[in-house]
Amino acid sequence: MAVDTITRPKGSTGDFKGDIHVNDDPPTKNDLGRVAELPVLDMNGKPHAFRSLYNSDSNEPLRVLIIFIRHFFCGNCQEYLRSVSTSITPDGLKSLPTRTKVIVIGCGQPNLITMCARETGCPYPIYADPSKNLYAQLGMIRTLDLGPRSPQYMQYSLPSAMVRSVYQNLKAGRSAFRGGNYWQVGGEFLLEDGRASWCHRMRNTRDHTEIPETRRQLGLDGAHPPLRKTFSSGIRRSSSQLQRRLSDRRKSWSRSRDRTEKSSPEGSMMEKVKENRHEEEASEGWSNEESKMSGTAGTNDDGASR
Protein backbone atom coordinates (compact mmCIF):
# COMPACT_ATOMS: atom_id res chain seq x y z
CA MET A 1 0.00 0.00 0.00
CA ALA A 2 2.31 2.75 1.19
CA VAL A 3 5.64 1.14 0.40
CA ASP A 4 7.01 1.55 -3.10
CA THR A 5 7.54 -1.67 -5.02
CA ILE A 6 10.77 -3.29 -3.81
CA THR A 7 12.27 -6.43 -5.26
CA ARG A 8 13.05 -8.73 -2.36
CA PRO A 9 15.45 -11.65 -2.74
CA LYS A 10 14.21 -15.15 -1.98
CA GLY A 11 14.19 -15.90 1.71
CA SER A 12 14.44 -12.20 2.62
CA THR A 13 13.30 -11.28 6.12
CA GLY A 14 12.37 -7.75 5.11
CA ASP A 15 15.61 -6.19 6.45
CA PHE A 16 17.47 -3.89 4.07
CA LYS A 17 20.72 -2.00 3.95
CA GLY A 18 20.72 1.56 2.70
CA ASP A 19 18.12 4.32 2.42
CA ILE A 20 14.84 2.64 1.44
CA HIS A 21 12.46 4.43 -0.90
CA VAL A 22 9.02 4.59 0.68
CA ASN A 23 6.23 7.06 0.08
CA ASP A 24 4.39 9.21 2.58
CA ASP A 25 0.84 8.48 1.44
CA PRO A 26 -1.39 8.48 4.54
CA PRO A 27 -3.11 5.17 5.31
CA THR A 28 -6.56 4.93 3.77
CA LYS A 29 -9.77 4.28 5.67
CA ASN A 30 -9.53 0.60 4.67
CA ASP A 31 -5.90 0.47 5.83
CA LEU A 32 -6.87 1.80 9.26
CA GLY A 33 -9.77 -0.63 9.37
CA ARG A 34 -7.35 -3.53 9.00
CA VAL A 35 -5.23 -2.42 11.95
CA ALA A 36 -7.96 -0.98 14.18
CA GLU A 37 -8.12 -4.00 16.48
CA LEU A 38 -4.39 -4.74 16.62
CA PRO A 39 -3.20 -4.52 20.24
CA VAL A 40 -0.68 -2.16 21.75
CA LEU A 41 0.53 -2.64 25.32
CA ASP A 42 0.75 -0.03 28.05
CA MET A 43 3.48 0.10 30.71
CA ASN A 44 1.69 -2.58 32.74
CA GLY A 45 1.42 -4.93 29.76
CA LYS A 46 -2.33 -4.33 29.40
CA PRO A 47 -3.49 -4.53 25.74
CA HIS A 48 -5.45 -1.74 24.06
CA ALA A 49 -6.96 -1.77 20.58
CA PHE A 50 -5.05 0.57 18.29
CA ARG A 51 -8.26 2.43 17.37
CA SER A 52 -8.75 3.39 21.04
CA LEU A 53 -5.71 5.65 20.79
CA TYR A 54 -7.17 7.96 18.14
CA ASN A 55 -10.97 7.62 18.34
CA SER A 56 -12.68 10.42 20.23
CA ASP A 57 -14.52 9.44 23.39
CA SER A 58 -16.93 12.33 22.89
CA ASN A 59 -18.52 14.35 20.11
CA GLU A 60 -15.60 16.75 20.30
CA PRO A 61 -13.18 16.59 17.31
CA LEU A 62 -9.85 14.98 18.10
CA ARG A 63 -6.45 15.01 16.44
CA VAL A 64 -3.75 12.55 17.45
CA LEU A 65 -0.09 12.60 16.43
CA ILE A 66 1.25 9.04 16.74
CA ILE A 67 5.03 8.78 16.77
CA PHE A 68 6.46 5.34 16.01
CA ILE A 69 10.02 5.03 17.30
CA ARG A 70 12.59 2.27 16.86
CA HIS A 71 13.75 0.09 19.77
CA PHE A 72 13.46 1.64 23.22
CA PHE A 73 17.26 1.99 23.59
CA CYS A 74 17.69 3.92 20.32
CA GLY A 75 19.64 7.09 21.11
CA ASN A 76 18.42 8.82 17.93
CA CYS A 77 14.76 8.23 18.74
CA GLN A 78 15.28 9.22 22.36
CA GLU A 79 16.78 12.48 21.20
CA TYR A 80 13.76 13.02 18.94
CA LEU A 81 11.41 12.50 21.88
CA ARG A 82 13.43 14.98 23.94
CA SER A 83 13.07 17.57 21.21
CA VAL A 84 9.36 16.85 20.86
CA SER A 85 8.89 17.11 24.62
CA THR A 86 10.56 20.52 24.85
CA SER A 87 9.05 22.08 21.70
CA ILE A 88 5.57 20.50 21.53
CA THR A 89 4.40 20.77 25.11
CA PRO A 90 1.02 19.79 26.60
CA ASP A 91 0.37 23.48 27.33
CA GLY A 92 1.13 24.31 23.71
CA LEU A 93 -1.35 21.69 22.51
CA LYS A 94 -4.03 23.17 24.78
CA SER A 95 -3.72 26.45 22.87
CA LEU A 96 -4.87 24.81 19.63
CA PRO A 97 -8.52 25.20 18.55
CA THR A 98 -8.90 21.40 18.11
CA ARG A 99 -8.23 18.97 20.94
CA THR A 100 -4.86 17.41 20.12
CA LYS A 101 -2.90 14.55 21.68
CA VAL A 102 0.53 13.01 21.14
CA ILE A 103 1.14 9.27 21.56
CA VAL A 104 4.39 7.30 21.24
CA ILE A 105 4.70 3.65 20.21
CA GLY A 106 7.91 1.59 20.37
CA CYS A 107 8.61 -1.93 19.12
CA GLY A 108 10.07 -3.33 22.35
CA GLN A 109 8.62 -4.91 25.47
CA PRO A 110 6.29 -2.84 27.70
CA ASN A 111 8.48 -3.19 30.81
CA LEU A 112 10.93 -0.72 29.18
CA ILE A 113 8.35 2.03 28.74
CA THR A 114 9.13 3.54 32.15
CA MET A 115 12.85 3.69 31.30
CA CYS A 116 12.10 5.38 27.97
CA ALA A 117 9.86 7.99 29.60
CA ARG A 118 12.46 8.69 32.29
CA GLU A 119 15.38 9.01 29.86
CA THR A 120 13.53 11.31 27.45
CA GLY A 121 11.33 13.30 29.82
CA CYS A 122 8.42 12.48 27.52
CA PRO A 123 5.13 13.69 29.07
CA TYR A 124 2.97 11.76 26.59
CA PRO A 125 1.62 8.20 26.79
CA ILE A 126 3.98 5.52 25.49
CA TYR A 127 2.85 2.11 24.25
CA ALA A 128 4.61 -0.98 22.94
CA ASP A 129 4.06 -3.09 19.83
CA PRO A 130 6.54 -5.95 20.29
CA SER A 131 4.87 -7.94 17.49
CA LYS A 132 5.64 -5.07 15.06
CA ASN A 133 2.38 -5.85 13.23
CA LEU A 134 1.37 -2.20 13.24
CA TYR A 135 4.71 -1.18 11.77
CA ALA A 136 4.35 -3.68 8.94
CA GLN A 137 0.68 -2.97 8.19
CA LEU A 138 1.22 0.79 8.12
CA GLY A 139 4.11 0.54 5.66
CA MET A 140 7.11 1.14 7.91
CA ILE A 141 10.26 -0.69 6.88
CA ARG A 142 13.50 -2.08 8.36
CA THR A 143 16.97 -0.74 7.74
CA LEU A 144 20.19 0.07 9.62
CA ASP A 145 21.23 2.91 7.33
CA LEU A 146 22.10 6.13 9.20
CA GLY A 147 21.15 8.43 6.35
CA PRO A 148 23.22 11.16 4.67
CA ARG A 149 23.14 13.76 7.44
CA SER A 150 22.53 14.37 11.11
CA PRO A 151 19.05 15.83 11.67
CA GLN A 152 18.43 19.12 13.43
CA TYR A 153 16.57 17.51 16.29
CA MET A 154 19.76 15.73 17.39
CA GLN A 155 21.62 18.19 19.61
CA TYR A 156 24.57 15.94 20.44
CA SER A 157 26.92 13.73 18.47
CA LEU A 158 26.27 10.23 17.18
CA PRO A 159 29.06 8.74 19.38
CA SER A 160 27.37 10.25 22.44
CA ALA A 161 24.09 8.64 21.40
CA MET A 162 25.82 5.29 21.03
CA VAL A 163 27.51 5.58 24.44
CA ARG A 164 24.21 6.39 26.08
CA SER A 165 22.48 3.49 24.33
CA VAL A 166 25.19 1.02 25.42
CA TYR A 167 25.04 2.31 29.00
CA GLN A 168 21.26 1.90 29.10
CA ASN A 169 21.58 -1.64 27.71
CA LEU A 170 24.09 -2.57 30.42
CA LYS A 171 21.96 -0.98 33.11
CA ALA A 172 18.85 -2.84 31.93
CA GLY A 173 20.33 -6.23 32.81
CA ARG A 174 18.07 -9.03 31.61
CA SER A 175 15.89 -6.53 29.71
CA ALA A 176 18.81 -5.50 27.49
CA PHE A 177 17.50 -7.67 24.64
CA ARG A 178 13.87 -6.61 25.03
CA GLY A 179 14.17 -3.12 23.57
CA GLY A 180 12.95 -4.21 20.13
CA ASN A 181 14.26 -5.04 16.67
CA TYR A 182 17.27 -2.83 15.83
CA TRP A 183 16.36 -2.94 12.12
CA GLN A 184 12.85 -1.55 12.58
CA VAL A 185 12.31 2.14 11.85
CA GLY A 186 9.16 4.13 12.46
CA GLY A 187 7.46 7.33 11.42
CA GLU A 188 4.82 9.91 12.31
CA PHE A 189 1.08 9.71 11.60
CA LEU A 190 -1.49 12.45 12.17
CA LEU A 191 -5.06 11.21 12.54
CA GLU A 192 -8.05 13.56 12.63
CA ASP A 193 -11.47 12.24 13.56
CA GLY A 194 -10.33 8.70 12.85
CA ARG A 195 -8.78 9.46 9.43
CA ALA A 196 -5.12 9.84 8.56
CA SER A 197 -4.47 13.34 7.20
CA TRP A 198 -0.66 13.25 7.06
CA CYS A 199 2.22 10.85 7.65
CA HIS A 200 5.96 10.44 7.28
CA ARG A 201 7.72 7.07 7.10
CA MET A 202 11.37 6.92 8.06
CA ARG A 203 13.88 6.02 5.30
CA ASN A 204 16.75 5.48 7.74
CA THR A 205 17.42 5.33 11.46
CA ARG A 206 17.64 9.13 11.85
CA ASP A 207 14.76 10.15 9.60
CA HIS A 208 12.08 11.36 12.01
CA THR A 209 10.23 14.47 10.81
CA GLU A 210 12.10 17.63 11.76
CA ILE A 211 10.48 19.53 14.62
CA PRO A 212 9.49 22.69 12.67
CA GLU A 213 7.57 20.56 10.14
CA THR A 214 5.90 18.55 12.90
CA ARG A 215 4.83 21.77 14.60
CA ARG A 216 3.50 23.12 11.32
CA GLN A 217 1.40 19.99 10.78
CA LEU A 218 -0.11 20.46 14.22
CA GLY A 219 -0.91 24.11 13.56
CA LEU A 220 1.85 25.46 15.78
CA ASP A 221 4.49 27.89 14.51
CA GLY A 222 7.51 26.56 12.64
CA ALA A 223 10.10 27.66 15.20
CA HIS A 224 13.09 25.47 15.89
CA PRO A 225 13.18 23.59 19.20
CA PRO A 226 15.01 25.34 22.05
CA LEU A 227 18.59 24.29 22.65
CA ARG A 228 18.97 21.80 25.45
CA LYS A 229 21.91 20.72 27.57
CA THR A 230 23.74 18.11 25.55
CA PHE A 231 24.63 14.67 26.78
CA SER A 232 28.36 15.52 26.61
CA SER A 233 27.91 18.32 29.13
CA GLY A 234 26.13 15.87 31.37
CA ILE A 235 29.06 13.47 31.02
CA ARG A 236 31.54 16.18 32.04
CA ARG A 237 29.40 17.15 35.01
CA SER A 238 28.96 13.55 36.08
CA SER A 239 32.69 12.93 35.67
CA SER A 240 33.65 15.81 37.98
CA GLN A 241 31.05 14.69 40.53
CA LEU A 242 32.44 11.16 40.37
CA GLN A 243 35.98 12.41 40.94
CA ARG A 244 34.85 14.35 44.02
CA ARG A 245 33.04 11.31 45.37
CA LEU A 246 36.12 9.12 44.86
CA SER A 247 38.33 11.68 46.59
CA ASP A 248 35.94 11.86 49.56
CA ARG A 249 35.74 8.07 49.65
CA ARG A 250 39.57 7.74 49.72
CA LYS A 251 39.76 10.20 52.62
CA SER A 252 37.07 8.30 54.47
CA TRP A 253 38.85 5.01 53.91
CA SER A 254 42.12 6.52 55.15
CA ARG A 255 40.50 7.82 58.37
CA SER A 256 38.75 4.50 58.93
CA ARG A 257 41.99 2.58 58.42
CA ASP A 258 43.81 4.77 60.93
CA ARG A 259 41.07 4.25 63.52
CA THR A 260 41.11 0.49 62.90
CA GLU A 261 44.87 0.26 63.30
CA LYS A 262 44.79 2.17 66.56
CA SER A 263 41.93 0.15 68.03
CA SER A 264 43.37 -3.29 67.14
CA PRO A 265 45.87 -5.14 69.45
CA GLU A 266 48.49 -4.97 66.74
CA GLY A 267 47.80 -1.30 66.33
CA SER A 268 48.15 -0.69 70.07
CA MET A 269 51.47 -2.54 70.14
CA MET A 270 52.70 -0.48 67.20
CA GLU A 271 51.68 2.70 68.97
CA LYS A 272 53.60 1.61 72.11
CA VAL A 273 56.66 0.76 70.02
CA LYS A 274 56.51 4.19 68.41
CA GLU A 275 56.18 5.87 71.82
CA ASN A 276 59.14 3.89 73.24
CA ARG A 277 61.19 4.77 70.18
CA HIS A 278 60.39 8.45 70.62
CA GLU A 279 61.33 8.25 74.33
CA GLU A 280 64.62 6.50 73.52
CA GLU A 281 65.45 9.09 70.88
CA ALA A 282 64.65 11.88 73.31
CA SER A 283 66.76 10.25 76.04
CA GLU A 284 69.69 9.83 73.68
CA GLY A 285 69.35 13.44 72.68
CA TRP A 286 69.54 14.62 76.30
CA SER A 287 72.54 12.36 76.95
CA ASN A 288 74.39 13.83 74.01
CA GLU A 289 73.60 17.33 75.17
CA GLU A 290 74.86 16.55 78.68
CA SER A 291 78.09 15.07 77.28
CA LYS A 292 78.69 18.15 75.21
CA MET A 293 78.04 20.37 78.18
CA SER A 294 80.40 18.30 80.40
CA GLY A 295 83.16 18.46 77.81
CA THR A 296 82.79 22.21 77.51
CA ALA A 297 82.89 22.66 81.26
CA GLY A 298 86.08 20.54 81.56
CA THR A 299 87.84 22.59 78.94
CA ASN A 300 86.95 25.82 80.69
CA ASP A 301 88.33 24.50 84.03
CA ASP A 302 91.63 23.54 82.45
CA GLY A 303 91.96 26.95 80.93
CA ALA A 304 91.33 28.58 84.26
CA SER A 305 93.96 26.48 86.10
CA ARG A 306 96.60 27.42 83.58
Image (cartoon, helix red, strand yellow):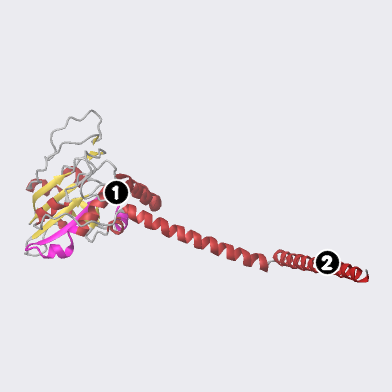
Tell me which segment is drawn in magenta. Answer: 87-115
Front-most of 84 and 56?
Answer: 84
Mark drawn on residue 75:
1
Taking the view exactly as shown, the residue that stands out farthest to the right is 305
* Quadrant in which residue 233 is drawn: bottom left
Please name the residue shown 18% across and 47% down the image: 187
Front-most of 156 and 166?
Answer: 156
Is 25 located above or below residue 195 in the figure? above
Quadrant occupied by the C terminus = bottom right
Residue 302 highlighted magenta (yes or no): no
Within 10 Å of the Cα at label 2, are there few (<14), some (14-19), or many (20+) other Cα atoms?
Answer: few
The x and y percentages for residue 220 are 10, 58
Circle 2 sits on which residue?
Answer: 292
Q: Secondary structure at mark 1?
A: helix
Within 10 Å of the Cα at label 1, are there few (<14), some (14-19), or many (20+) other Cα atoms?
Answer: many
Q: Secondary structure at mark 2?
A: helix
